[in-house]
Image: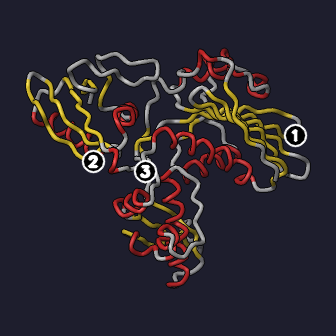
Amino acid sequence: MRRSIHSLLLTLVCYCGLLGSAAQAVVIKDLYEALVPVETQSREERQTALSTGLIEVLTRVSGQTLIVSENPEDPILMAVQNPTRFTGQFRYRQVKSGSTKLELWIKYDEKAVNNLLQSNNKPVWGHTRPPTLAWVVVTENGRRNLLSNSDKHAVKDAMKWIANKRGLPLSFPLMDLTDRGNISVSDIWGNFDDRILKASQRYSAEAVIVGRLYKGTSDQWSARWSVYHQGRRQDLDVDGEQNLQVAVTPVIARTAESLAQQFALVKNEEVSESVTVKITGVTSLKEFNHVVKYLKSLTAVSEVSPVVVGNAAASFKLVTQSGRLGLAQAIKLGHVLAEQIPTATTTGIPIPATGGPDLVYQLVQ
């Protein structure tokens, strides 16, 4: 398989902030869970399955394609070889009712997994993640088909399956009257940047995948992929793959890695920073407790201390290893707080008020 990967700056600079400006985040509930097919319930096979599942979870939580070192003293390798201490629960279950095929469901310990990554300078990407939109045209038997949200197709199933493995919220366009008026199959096949990005605007996605797949007479798949994120386009080519999952994996992995670079956090105790956050609309003890719980749930935050409470507002001092920018990005992904004055810069990061709080938000739910 030949893969060529390159990055190029979009000529349409006006779209640089388009995709992520109003992205509605998705909460990934099974971030620390894995399903591994097994043949038996033997102890040896269970240990192998626990190791396989741990690699999957470490990859999903870090956002990075995990490359395990061969160094016997490498902590990540040691964890994969001894996965039991990272395992919270597991149970066997049949793949289908009445089937003899088994799979092992595993839930790993969130704190232990995060500590392993952070202690080895790896990022931790939280449960709240931005959505990705996929425009995919498939050529089969001389016909081109643009996959929609309601279509059933092997390409779509493969992309969804790999995206789930990477913890990447992935959706396909509705292809309703609005979409059909904004874009065509030829626009996707020609990879016309302006048409694609304009049609994507209604979906408020943080990243956009464009795929042009061709199934040859020998049932081999070739694909030309593009990933649009933060005003840049990354291109990947895959040629002559018999396995469809292998043909779609590179673009899902690259998208997850690109988003993780923006949103996943590498803990660094040496650069801990205190950030003051003011939240308006806090009018009851219930709302106050809700805000405290939410702030403590953010991966970017290690400590939450109330500073001032009253006049339908509450101010907090937060300790974070990601700085004001990283904290603002983490809050931006959620649905709990809405950015308030001071106004945002063109990068979407609020400007601190002189002599006031670093960040100001309105409680919305």
Compared across the picture, whether 15 is left or right of 204 comes to right
Q: Residue at x 60, y 78 (%)?
A: 39
Decide: marks 3, 1 in contact (CB < 8 A)?
Answer: no
Q: Which mark is residue 302?
A: 2
Residue 298 seen in the current view: no
Q: Residue furthest front?
A: 270
- Looking at the rendered structure, the kind of residue marked 2 is Ser
Q: Which residue is mark 3?
A: 124
**Distance between the alpha carbons at the discs numbered 1 and 2:** 55 Å
The answer to which image quadrant residue 307 occupies is top left
Q: Earlier in the sequence, mark 3 or mark 1?
A: 3
Q: Residue at x 19, y 23 (%)?
A: 280
How many other residues sit within 10 Å of disc 2, few (<14), some (14-19) or many (≥20)? some
Residue 107, position as x, y percentages in the image = 41, 64
Q: Earlier in the sequence, mark 1 or mark 2?
A: 1
How many other residues sit within 10 Å of disc 1, few (<14), some (14-19) or many (≥20)? few
Question: Mark 3 falls on what kind of element?
Answer: loop
- Looking at the rendered structure, the kind of residue marked 3 is Val
Q: Which residue is mark 1?
A: 141
Give 185 or 271, whichever is nearer the viewer.
271
Give 247 or 267, whichever is nearer the viewer.
267
